[in-house]
Image: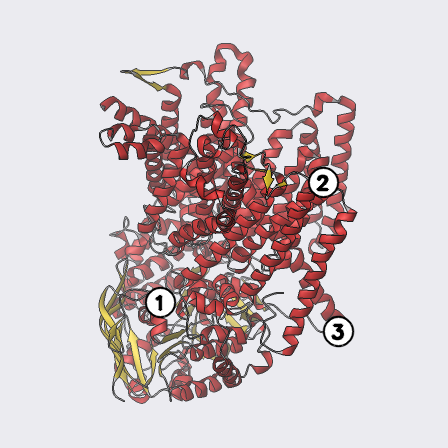
Amino acid sequence: MLPSILDGIFNGLSIGSILLMAALGLAIVFGLMGVINMAHGELMMLGAYTTYVVQNLFKPLGIFSQTYIFFALIMAFIVAALAGLILERGVIRYLYGRPLETLLATWGVSLMLQQFVRSVNWVLIAGLAIFCLLYFGGMWFVKKRPDFDVIRQKAIALLLPLSAAVAVAVGVFLSQTFKSAVTQPWFGAQNVDVTAPKWLQGGLPIGNYQLPYTRMFIMVLTALCVAGIYFFLNKTAWGLRIRSVTQNRNMSACLGIPTNKVDALTFALGSGLAGIAGCAVSLLGSVGPNTGQNYIVNTFMVVVVGGVGKLVGTIAGAMVIGLIDYILGAGILALLFAQIPPVAEFFTFFATTSMAKVMVFLLIVIFLQYKPAGLFPQKGRTVDA
Amino acid sequence: MSEKILEIENLTVNFDGFRALNNLGFSLDTGELRVIIGPNGAGKTTFLDIITGKTKPTEGQVRFKGRNLRPYAEYQIAEMGIGRKFQTPRVYLNLSPRENLELACNRVKGVFSTLFKRTPSPEKRTVSGLLETIGLVPKADMKANLLSHGEKQWLEIGMLVAQSPDLLLVDEPVAGLTDEETERTGELLISLAQSHSIIVIEHDMEFVRQIARQVTVLHQGSVLCEGTIDEVQNDPKVIEVYLGKEEVQHEDDMRPMSYPVSAEDAIVT
Amino acid sequence: MTTAQIERGGVGISRKLMVEAAIVLGIMLFLIFVLPLLMSDFRLNLTGRFLALSIAALGIDLIWGFTGMLSLGHGVFFTLGGYALAMYLKLQIPANASSQLPEFMGLYGVTELPWFWKPFYSFPITALMVVLLPAIVAAILGYLIFRNRIRGVYFSILTQATTIIFFNFFNGQQKLFNGTNGLTDFKTLFGLEVSKPGAQYVFYVLTILFLAATYALSRWLTSGRFGRLLVAIRDDEPRVRFTGYNPTGFKVLVFAISAAFAGLAGALFTLQTGIISPNSMNIAFSIEMVIWVAVGGRATLVGAILGTLVVNFAKSNLSEKFPDIWLFFQGALFLLVVLFLPNGIVGWLRDRGLDTFQNLTGKRKRSMTYPSLEEDPEVDYERKNTGD
Amino acid sequence: MTQTYSTVASGSGVAASPMLQVTGLNVYYGESHILRNVDLTVPRGEMVCLIGRNGVGKTTMLKTLMGLLKPRSGNIIFDGQPILGKTPDRRAKLGIGYVPQGREVIPRLTVKENLLLGYEARATRPQNTTEIPEEIYELFPVLKTMLTRMGGDLSGGQQQQLAIARAIMGQPQLLVLDEPTEGIQPSIILDIEAAVKRIVATTGISVLLVEQHLHFVRQADRYYAMQKGGIVASGSTRELSNEVIQKFLAV
């Protein structure tokens, strides 16, 4: 009995820490900025693919290759953060205060990102690079002119199709000259496999059970990330600015805080965390274009249960959901109530991974009847969604 | 006549340690028109929030026609006969004035009666009459977001009347209105006062003088004083709250008061 | 369009209504009698499917366009309706068959029909269940959410979670619902062979009739006082409460009705595709429904139907030609509509149409107060502070 | 003390131009005309007070000055350069220190963190950014004792002192105060008045004050009286007659 409970707690916490990892970035973006980012899962996916790429780059390095995971973590953070930055500057900043629109727009972005990893190849990259170079370079050039405001519309109308045409032309040219060398998708629609470094394979045996090292690694990583975020938000100048803007945007601006930069930075940070989460989940199984979709709803649930705007709420939410999920799914309750057949039968019915999720959701809805604002509701001014 | 429509005793409201209302006592006779004034942050809007059920008091109670309002939700209190006009006009912008009024006028506010019953003709007549009263007949069927600010204010007052409450709570009805509009609003309120009990919150003192019989001054969450407009204007406590220690009456004393900290002490360079 | 024109019992209004009815009838006749001559059976079947989907879009429009609640869970209601009908179809087993159970149950060793399948022997009950089942689920869920004044994105997130939950549930229950594979391989309905073109034409006509009926119902709901109250709830829910209405009941009812629409759509869609599976409960499909309405123009019933047809035809054409990059198109569509066409096609046509008209008649364009009020900090502050 | 604020004294831009010049300002909330053709000037080194009853548009005026509201027409020139196109944070960095109505202390930051936010307005941040200059404590001794408390937990008067201190941390050239005495006990009002006077005396910065408290109004050099969104009277506060007070300020 005792080992099974220990096993339940360990596995529950481990599921919880993966949830937390994934929800952390989301909670920051949602809690601090009131933005629902449906593309959060895809940012995780980007992190996972980055891990895959880094792993392959490290393969020729022999024994040294086993350290790829650390570089992968950093790269995953950077790639996802950059993607988030582009997303914020390009789309989200026009939609602040309109959460439902943000939700739809970021969903569109998530679809595009999914397709991007499926069909990304050298032609696509070259085309994109040329387009960006021409269009943004051109705009940068035009911006210097004193009559920019007057000719702005015209400049866009001219530059946009022109750069697009050049990019497409180059793309076509490249694909016809080099054929499959450049048109071959990098990843394709298939899942790709990240193998955990050797030193993370296996596990720590405790009695009949084994604590897999990868899960322990993820738990440690999660703890580090939480600590890092806590430090960043509470001890650094930018953290102070972020907290200030979150609580009172207008006053913060009047104090001289560049709110635009704070928004961009917050979003990039949240996205970067998604990247790290993606790197972490890639250790648990193969990753594919749909990887992000599997996490998005669960992470939203964490935020809803935890309450908006407090780190501790997110942590508690993730752990509670992780524990209940595992305890139900592994049928531990069914074992506990073995003496009372109807109850045991009831829990046996929910003792599969997918049915446990059904039960967890029901519990969440019931929980919200008593605490509609989550475990740790924010007092005073809140993000009114 | 002297029957109380609204009685408030020992009302205290705490927001996270901040006392928005502090041991406030207040009562209103049936058929009375009362104006409430007070500096910003005196608790006027919280006062209305409490009466309409948006905020629940920390202590004390509000009795409307003898009934304690605490257990009721906003919509129930509204149905009991308390109507509220907000500071900035809140009309339904995508509906026409006529539709706005019809919604407010609807007597039976259940889901199914709203769905199945057509607007009865007495209500239609009330709405037409109201449209005339608030001068919106020519614009009755265009969307409310095309109305001017003043017209929206009037429309919201119209909605309030359509609801036919016994007690009207009117928050700054003349904010952002022109002088002429202000005066017409005053006349409208005075005529309404013949058949309703009304509480008006207002800053515009000329307007207050136009409509007020009894005035209550709120300050730091409590009632500072109550009386006719002249009594209130000459009350030293009120003058202090509005103007500070230096009293207006002291015409000779125009020099600044000396500081507790002497100037020499204060300016250390 | 629809909310602006309100019956006031006047002669002019009822004439307008007659004109509208005539137009609707004209379109119906065209779809039923002329279109089949112009299209191949395959295309006609596609059209029928899309018309069925537009019934669901009408439902989305009712709750999102008119009432302002963004449901990301309509795939569930759609699928529930589909399953209800599919269960009836699966029970149409010839008397001489070796097993009197749907064939997949044999594979999983089920020997007795589960109790909740039994009512689906009866067609009237099935027909009722197609709309009632989703409506009841929606009503319960809606009541639990709305009574706590959970709204906005929280409502969206919870409805989205609902899709995942039902998806998991149906996927996990092989013995009860054939799991991932769903219910398919339907044989007969009232003795008609379901897959034959003749039967499919009947379903096509049926879809059109139902679409017309749901359109009329939506039209009725959104005109009258009820419809105006929905708009009022969308614009300013706390204000509605202070007027003496309890918004919860209204929201629950409209959510249930829109779920029933989705259920009906699911049933008609299942008839025409011959399959219903948990796949239509994935998140993507539910959000797609929303984008149909957004593309067409929310709060316009015509827009919902138009948007559904436009997006789906574009999808079937584009995904045939460029299967690889359809998602790019779709994602870009989301972005473009949200960023540049917030009122959809119909809204754009209406606004532009009004502008052009006013330019022609020399009138200046009226300044809109609504957007500026949105930015108004006072209003914003008050909304926040009086809004729960 | 003088060293801390020394940048201010010399000033920048055109020395002859006033600190702040507002011309023909018209502001609307939606359709409602809040400010009508407002003209207002704050000369360098002077304290100017804007008086008028609640709801006449004084706060709107200050919000427009800070860039929180966009005027439909008119111009604002600060220190010789037009600032209408600039965002609030740019304006703060140019040297406008804003103490808004209701203090707007950031509620869930500590007092110290609130103060540190004041550094944001400086063009170049000082080396040691986690220390509060001693002058701040000299101005408002009460703050020193509650550095670790949450801003939202302070009393109204303490919050007001914190808000002013926070603005001063940014070494502004123009201090904008919106009803600093509103809802505050008389004893603290005197402290605040003294502190503002001291700031003016030691740093020579300009002050634009919105006030209804007559005693404080008298401390200013000039006044502008507002009614219904327009400036209806102005002059030196020494000439501020009882008639004007009765008309525009009294109950």
The residue shown at (51%, 73%) is B118
Say which of D186 and B20 sits in front.
B20
Question: In this figure, which residue is indicated by the disc labeled 3?
Answer: C361
Residue C163 lies, with reference to residue B8, above or below; the image says: above
Image coordinates for residue C16, horizontal then vertical, percent? 66, 71
Question: Circle 2 sits in a helix, a strand or a loop, which is it?
Answer: helix
Q: How many marks?
A: 3
Left or right: D88, with C355 as reference point: left
Q: How far separated are the C-alphas under marks 2 and 3?
A: 47 Å
Between residues B161 and C187, which one lies in front from this camera angle? C187
Q: Nearer the viewer, mark 3 or mark 1?
A: 1
Q: Residue furthest top?
A: A62
Q: Position of residue D105 (x, y in %)?
A: 36, 57
The quarter holding residue A317 reads top left
Q: CA distance from mark 3 to mark 1?
A: 47 Å
Residue C74 drawn at (x, y percent)? 51, 47
| Mark 2 lies on residue | C42
Tell me whether circle 2 and circle 3 mark residues in contact (CB < 8 Å).
no
Decide: few, some or many residues near mark 1? Use Cα within 10 Å; few <14, some 14-19, many ≥20: many
Q: Earlier in the sequence, mark 2 or mark 3?
A: 2
Q: Is residue D176 visible?
A: no
Amino acid at dot 2: Phe
| Chain letter of the residue carrying label 2 | C
Q: What x and y, as percent, mark residue A342?
A: 27, 35
Q: Are marks 1 and 2 in contact (CB under 8 Å)?
A: no
Q: Residues within 10 Å of mark 2 (few under 14, many from 20)?
A: few
Q: Which residue is mark 1?
A: B74
The amino acid type found where label 1 is placed reads Glu
Q: Chain of mark 3?
A: C
Q: Is residue C369 left or right of residue A318?
A: right
Whether callout 1 and callout 2 share a subunit is answered: no
